[in-house]
Amino acid sequence: MTIRKLFDKAKHFEIDLYNVSSDFTRNHVAFTGTPEKHPREKDKILLFIDPFSACVTYYEFTIADIAGVEELPSIVSMEGKSVTMYRIWVRKGSLGIRSTPFIVEDTSHVRVR
């Protein structure tokens, strides 16, 4: 199943296991997380590495660079909310963006020892 078909479905994603050969792994790199549609660009996805973490980190990939998707076991938060994890295979040499948002604060009052 392609990543584009993944986002054509409803909010709950059902993905078939993608069979990976050794030749395939030479030309692609695996990334694991929870995928979501990009909020503005239809040809891209966001892949949240740890969806329950207070420190949100995600990757951004172009859908055309994704060659395969595997469904992994779900993870469960302390509150009982579950999220299915996925492994996506991205073509080597393609451009990805790693993003770690943070809060900007004034640190001028902090002294270095």
Image (cartoon, grey):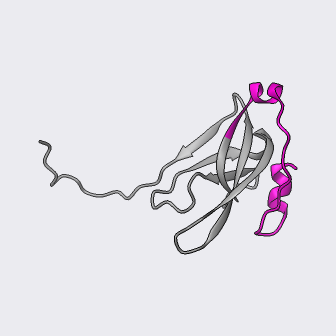
Vertical placement of 56 versus 31: above or below?
A: below
Is residue 37 in view? no
Q: Which residue does the image show at 88% across and 50% down from the upper left?
A: 1
Vertical placement of 27 versus 72: above or below?
A: above
Coordinates of residue 45 in the picture (x, y in percent): 70, 52
Q: Which residues are magenta?
A: 1-30
Q: Is residue 107 left or right of residue 44?
A: left
Q: Is residue 78 left or right of residue 106?
A: right
Magenta segment: does it hold 64?
A: no
Is residue 23 in view? yes
For the residue pair 85 and 2, the one nearer the viewer reads as 85
Q: Which residue does the image show at 13% across and 48% down from the upper left?
A: 111
All told, the count of numbered labels is 0
Coordinates of residue 3 in the picture (x, y in percent): 80, 50
For the residue pair 74 and 108, the one nearer the viewer reads as 74
Coordinates of residue 104 in the picture (x, y in percent): 34, 57
Magenta segment: does it hold 14?
A: yes
For the residue pair 11 and 72, the one nearer the viewer reads as 72
Vertical placement of 33 versus 113: above or below?
A: below
Q: Which residue does the image show at 16% across and 52% down from the upper left?
A: 110
Coordinates of residue 62 in the picture (x, y in percent): 72, 44
The quadrant of the rendering that contains the C terminus is: top left
Vertical placement of 41 versus 68: above or below?
A: below
